[in-house]
Structures are given as structure tokens and as C-alpha cells.
Image (cartoon, rainbow, N blue to C red):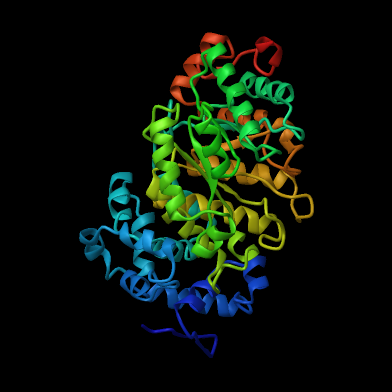
């Protein structure tokens, strides 16, 4: 395995694959904080050149985190289809990139090839792509899933209604939910982040959202984004959960910091299939975000793009209904400004889709980051062009509970109109019955939450 490149009259020598992968990344403040980023653009280009000539077999044969010591690595390794891997093992990363971008390469072919990939191979090819490459390649990939309804079809942009409240007020959540529904948002999930992580609070919120779904016959699914153990306690007490939720990291140590492991996820998977209220077969909601492993001191010297891809390798095991990268939520320590957030959002969406995950993106930033709402509008348009399955909607793009900036309900409605996209078919049919949509467009009733009061 050649780890040397001559560039600009200088020879660059990298010690191992881990260093090549890290230094081939586009600039990220998280990699700089970890002390693993390229020193300058020249070293970054040299690392990309080295990486482009490595084969997929080189990447698999030199694990960044050995399966004997890390269960995420084991999950990723055990999922590889050996027959398909044998067909592509001698492709270089550059050849893999060309294959994905080739005009004649279709979704069905990519879906088959994906079964022979590891998450590290997916991260490697992302590092060689421009932003436009990431949009183009991802736009070829269609990943549909079904919980109570189906999303992910071409031409569909779903939205998660996120009616959070700073005191877990049920009435406050309902007011926000009514606004979301009035704009045609909520087909991905009625998903609420609770302030109080208790089984009683989770149960109350699940009951409230399910009551609204039943009252108005809304074809969607509910979920409360508490810790998985709390959700399991609530479900045992009879809470009506269509899906279960959990945040994931790309290393075993990172997941330990989240209070989870594969054994617990397996137990929760069995429970939601036996006791959940979703029709399935896709009954999970996972969230990720570049930098979470570093914040837990569990990154093992691996760059944040590769670790994010490994999150998706773990998520794939459970066949989720939706996966969401909360792209700018952690802060400038990991993604410093809008340029880095936009890049990360496109990387994450591409890497998840290539691993056959139903990817959504929380197009968001924190108030101490060098970004603003116009930057998020730009990313949202790029993601819509790339075929993102869904994005997040909060009132006025300002989450008053989590204290960060995201996209609003009417932002999602605008993206649908601009990009000629529509809600999930079952949800659109319901919107038409309610008089909120007609022939794929919002009616004058849209945006009026009092129709649900």
C-alpha cells in the first residue's frame, strides 16, 4: 500500500491509512481540534492523491479500528456481502468515484454494490468529491421506507414536525403541531424532544400525539426523542410508540458515552417490533452528527467524516425508517462556519444514502457559529436537489427548547414549491381531504393552525 505522494516538488509521506483518511478531509475545525487535520491545502491535496490510488481492498485490509476491539467495526464487517466485495475489491477509490458519477450508473446498480462496501470505503470516496459531486451522486439513490406510511420516493420531500416546548407543555406542543400540519409538515414523523427524560413524560407526549393522529386521522408516525431506556420503560407501561429513537456514535466507546451498546439496541429492536404501534417494517429513528465521538473523547484518532460514516454502518443493521444528521448542532468546535456545515450536510447525506439509509438532515446551526439563516437556506436547496428524504421543521426556524436555529415549517413548504416536490402520497391525500393542499399546491387555508382547534 503506497502512502507517498510527490507534489509541488515535495514528497509527502503518511504513516498509515488513518492519517491519509484524516488529512484527505476538507477543512473541519473538529479534525483540527483533534490534531489530525492536514497542515495546509498542499498536504490535503497530497493525501487525496494517495487515497485516490488505494483500492477498496486496501481500505478493508487495514481497519482503522479493529473489529476485535470495537463492536461497531464488527457490525460493519459482518454486513459485507463477500461475493459483491470480491467483484469490486480491486477498484481504486478514484475508480469508485467515477463509477458513482457516471451518467449510466443507476440506482439499482448502486444499491447492489453498496452491499459489498464498508463504511470506511464510503467515507473515502466522499473525500474525493466536490460538493456538486455529492449532490449528483446522492440524487441517483432512492431509499424508501415504511413505518405507518411510505417516504423516500423520487419527487417526495417529507418533513419532521418538531413541536418542542421548553417545559414539555402538551398544549404548547399541540399549538406548534397544528401550525406544522397546516403547512403540510409532519409526514416524516411527529417527533418531539422532551425536556424531562422520564417514562411518565415520554408516555404523556406519545399519548398526546397519538390522540391527535387518531382524532384527525393523520397518516404519519409518532416518536419521542428520549434516551432509548426511557422509551422502553414508557412502552412497557403502554405508551403508543410507532418508532423508537436513539443517537448513535461511530465507535463503541462513543456509544458507551451515550449509554448504549449493540445488545441494548437489539433488545429495543425486539421490543418495538413486539409492542410498538407502528406497522413497520421500519421502526427506528436514529440521529447522528459529525464530532460527537471527539466530544466524548472516543474518536481513536479517526477523522469525523469517517466516524460519521461508521454511524451509518451501525444504523443500517436495524433498517430504520429515518436517519437524521443534526449537521450544525454541536457547534463551531467541530464545524466552524457555514462553509463547513454545508460541506458536512452534503457529505452526510451522500454517505448515508450510499449505505442505503433513509437520510434526513437537520439543516441547522448554533448561535455561536459563524453562520446565519441564509446559509441554511442555501444548504436546504442543495439537499433538496440531492434528493434528501426529509428535513426538520420548527416554528419560525427557532427551536425554543434546544436553543438552536433550524428550518421552519414554511421553509419546507417553500422548498417543495420551488423544487416541484410533494409530501408523502398518503399524507398528501390527507392534506387534500383537509383542504390544505390541492393538485400538489397549498391552498389559501394553509398556514392557519386554527383549522385544528
> Is residue 357 in view from this perspective?
no
Closest to the observer, 8 or 185: 185
Name the side, left or right, on which 78 lies relative to 165: left
Closest to the observer, 116 or 266: 266
Q: Hey, which residue is sitting farthest right in the picture?
A: 368
Q: In percent of the image, x 56 and y 32: which residue is there?
A: 159
Task: State the image coordinates of residue 119 (x, y, percent, origin top left).
Answer: 41, 61
Q: Is residue 23 above or below residue 147?
A: below
Closest to the observer, 418 or 205: 205
Q: In percent of the image, x 60 and y 41: which residue is there?
A: 226
Q: Is residue 266 above or below residue 215?
A: below
Name the side, left or right, on which 244 lies relative to 226: left
Task: State the image coordinates of residue 342 (x, y, percent, origin top left).
Answer: 62, 53
Q: Quadrant of the C terminus?
A: top right
Q: Hey, which residue is sitting farthest left in the picture?
A: 83
Name the side, left or right, on which 196 lies relative to 273: right
Q: In percent of the image, x 72 and y 31: which residue is there?
A: 168
Number of numbered discs visible in the structure rendering: 0
> Is residue 334 in view from this perspective?
yes
Q: Hey, which residue is sitting farthest front in the picture?
A: 237
Task: State the image coordinates of residue 347 (x, y, percent, origin top left).
Answer: 52, 55
Q: Is residue 368 above or below residue 412?
A: below
Residue 67 occupies quadrant = bottom left
Q: In percent of the image, x 54 and y 44: which residue is there?
A: 228
Q: Quadrant of the N terminus?
A: bottom left
Name the side, left or right, on which 206 lies relative to 236: right
Residue 151 occupies quadrant = top left
Q: Is residue 288 above or below residue 417?
A: below
Task: State the image coordinates of residue 221 (x, y, percent, origin top left).
Answer: 50, 27
Amino acid at each position: 500500500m503506497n502512502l507517498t505522494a510527490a507534489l509541488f516538488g515535495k514528497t509527502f509521506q503518511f504513516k498509515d491509512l488513518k492519517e491519509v483518511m484524516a488529512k484527505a478531509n476538507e477543512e473541519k475545525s473538529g479534525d483540527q481540534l483533534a490534531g489530525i487535520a492536514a497542515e495546509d491545502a498542499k498536504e490535503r491535496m497530497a493525501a487525496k492523491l494517495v487515497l485516490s490510488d488505494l483500492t477498496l481492498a486496501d481500505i478493508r485490509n487495514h481497519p482503522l479500528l479493529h473489529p476485535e476491539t470495537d463492536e461497531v467495526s464488527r457490525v460493519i464487517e459482518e454486513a459485507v456481502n463477500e461475493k459483491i466485495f470480491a467483484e469490486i475489491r480491486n477498484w481504486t477509490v478514484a475508480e469508485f468515484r467515477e463509477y458513482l458519477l457516471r451518467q449510466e450508473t443507476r440506482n439499482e446498480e448502486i444499491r447492489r454494490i453498496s452491499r459489498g462496501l464498508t463504511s470506511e470505503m464510503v467515507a473515502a470516496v466522499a473525500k474525493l468529491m466536490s460538493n456538486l459531486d455529492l449532490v449528483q451522486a446522492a440524487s441517483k439513490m432512492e431509499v424508501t421506507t415504511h413505518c405507518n406510511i411510505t417516504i423516500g420516493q423520487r419527487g417526495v420531500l417529507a418533513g419532521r414536525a418538531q413541536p418542542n416546548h421548553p417545559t414539555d407543555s402538551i398544549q404548547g406542543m399541540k399549538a406548534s403541531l397544528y401550525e406544522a400540519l397546516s403547512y403540510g409538515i409532519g409526514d416524516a414523523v411527529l417527533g418531539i424532544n422532551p425536556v424531562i427524560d422520564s417514562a411518565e413524560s415520554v408516555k404523556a407526549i406519545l399519548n398526546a400525539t397519538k390522540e391527535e393522529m387518531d382524532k384527525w386521522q393523520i397518516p404519519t408516525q409518532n416518536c419521542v426523542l428520549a434516551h432509548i431506556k426511557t422509551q422502553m420503560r414508557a412502552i412497557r407501561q403502554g405508551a403508543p410508540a410507532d418508532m423508537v429513537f436513539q443517537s448513535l456514535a461511530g465507535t463503541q466507546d462513543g456509544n458507551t458515552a451515550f449509554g448504549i451498546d449493540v445488545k441494548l439496541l437489539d433488545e429495543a429492536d425486539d421490543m418495538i417490533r413486539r409492542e410498538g404501534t407502528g406497522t413497520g417494517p421500519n421502526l427506528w429513528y436514529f440521529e447522528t452528527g459529525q464530532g460527537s465521538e471527539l466530544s466524548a473523547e472516543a474518536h481513536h484518532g479517526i477523522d469525523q467524516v469517517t466516524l460519521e460514516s461508521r454511524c451509518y454502518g451501525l444504523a443500517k443493521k436495524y433498517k430504520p425508517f429515518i436517519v437524521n444528521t443534526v449537521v450544525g448542532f454541536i457547534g463551531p468546535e467541530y464545524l466552524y462556519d457555514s462553509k463547513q456545515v454545508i460541506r458536512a450536510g452534503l457529505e452526510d447525506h451522500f454517505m448515508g444514502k450510499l449505505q442505503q439509509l433513509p437520510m434526513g438532515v437537520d439543516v441547522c446551526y448554533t448561535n455561536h457559529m459563524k453562520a446565519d439563516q441564509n446559509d441554511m437556506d442555501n444548504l436546504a436547496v442543495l439537499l433538496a436537489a440531492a434528493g434528501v428524504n426529509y428535513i426538520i421543521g420548527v416554528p419560525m426556524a427557532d427551536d425554543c427548547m434546544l436553543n438552536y436555529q433550524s428550518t421552519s415549517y414554511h421553509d419546507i413548504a417553500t422548498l417543495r414549491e420551488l423544487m416541484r416536490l410533494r409530501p408523502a402520497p398518503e399524507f398528501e391525500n390527507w392534506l387534500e381531504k383537509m383542504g390544505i393542499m390541492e393538485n400538489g399546491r397549498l391552498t389559501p387555508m394553509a398556514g392557519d393552525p386554527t383549522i385544528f382547534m
